[in-house]
Amino acid sequence: MVRNTIKVGMADLNVTKAPDQLTTLGLGSCVGITLYDGVNKIAGLAHIMLPSSKEIKNNDNKAKFADTGIEELIKSMVAIGANKNNLVAKIAGGAQMFNFNSNNHMLKIGERNVVATKEKLKELNIRIVSEDTGGNFGRTIVLDSTNGSLYVRTIGHGEKTI
Amino acid sequence: MLDVENLNHFMIDILKELGNIGAGNAATALASMISKRVDMDVPNVRILEFKEVAEVLGGEENLVVGIYFELTEDLVGNMMFALDMDSAINLTNMLFNREKKNSELDEMDISAISEVGNILASSYANSLSSLTGLKIVISVPSISIDMAGAILSVPAIQYGHIADHALMIETTFEENQNLVTGNLFFLPNLSSFDKILTALGVN
């Protein structure tokens, strides 16, 4: 069986069918949002940078934001045969890489990205089955489209499959 | 307002020159700290798509040390001093003049590296400030040792608010025995760019 691993960059998204994998490397404050349709074995991954497209004028790149990124991801998955009612979510990332004693809310962006992601998924009635978010470290994630498992690798904070 | 996607050659040259002056002073500061010659490349003005940003420091999963600063007041933006793990270890061995070399970073090393970053970023900012007459306040350093992609996501997100590209003025330093290579990034917020041009009398 030949398995391809498709890389998703920052502010980007992609979808695939079994047996391929989707990966995003070195997630920091961004959030990796994965959706999976276990019936049709279709997987999707979005690497979002910011919580909301509504706060920003320049919002052409839908994959940049939690709200439009999730919508676009679902659309792309449905386009290759997924059923929206089958989708479940797993999320990872949203770390705070640097610690400042300032009240600059930008630096809490990781946390805000996670909150916005959860709100949007709730609005769309998509259940979050597992997550690995927060902390102050980077993560690489790999989504397996044969079973929906999400592998999380870090430097110095272990690895796990969620 | 100017946007990152539409900078002309003239503006890029100005950014490059700012980088040259700032980094030149930082290189001198680094050389005197380690008592060795430090070479510096011509600054590189990089306008990158977000998916390219994470690859800048040798690949997304490359273990790097990043020291991050916020700039506020007249000139707003960020600075980051980044170096690979070997360079960081070699640098601290030089700073402490160790006979018996450490092979990893201890707490003292991390604190020292952080201070080196602080001195470099401050001398960079000071020279920009004296050149332009603009007031620049630099934050205390914050250090992270982790995957390059994760560290670079922080400045990328700052640009995410205004553009689909990140602007990085990058200078590479190299200690002359090739043991330490570091990158200093200056990431100006483009709302400050008009002020810079005016201050330089070219607007």
Image (cartoon, rainbow, N blue to C red):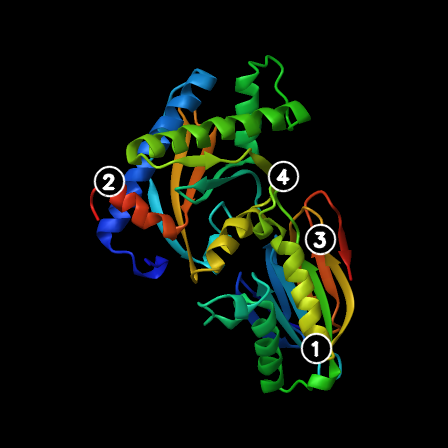
Q: Amino acid at mark 1?
A: Glu
Q: CA distance from mark 3 to mark 4?
A: 18 Å
The image's mark for residue B200 is: 2
Same-chain status of marks 1 and 3: yes
Q: Amino acid at mark 2?
A: Leu
Q: CA distance from mark 1 to mark 2?
A: 51 Å
Quadrant for residue B89, please give it: top right
> Which residue: 61% across, 39% down?
B144
Q: Is residue A79 above or below residue B141?
A: below
Residue projecting furthest to the left: B202
Q: Are marks 1 and 3 in contact (CB under 8 Å)?
A: no
Q: Earlier in the sequence, mark 3 or mark 4?
A: 4
Q: Chain of mark 4?
A: A
Q: Are marks 1 and 2 in contact (CB under 8 Å)?
A: no
- Disc 4 target residue: A101
> Which residue: 26% across, 50% down?
B11
- Disc 3 target residue: A134
* Residue B39 position within the rendered picture, expressed as x and y whole percent measured from the top left: 36, 27
- Disc 1 target residue: A123
Left or right of residue B126, residue B10 in this image: left
Residue A5 in view, yes or no:
no
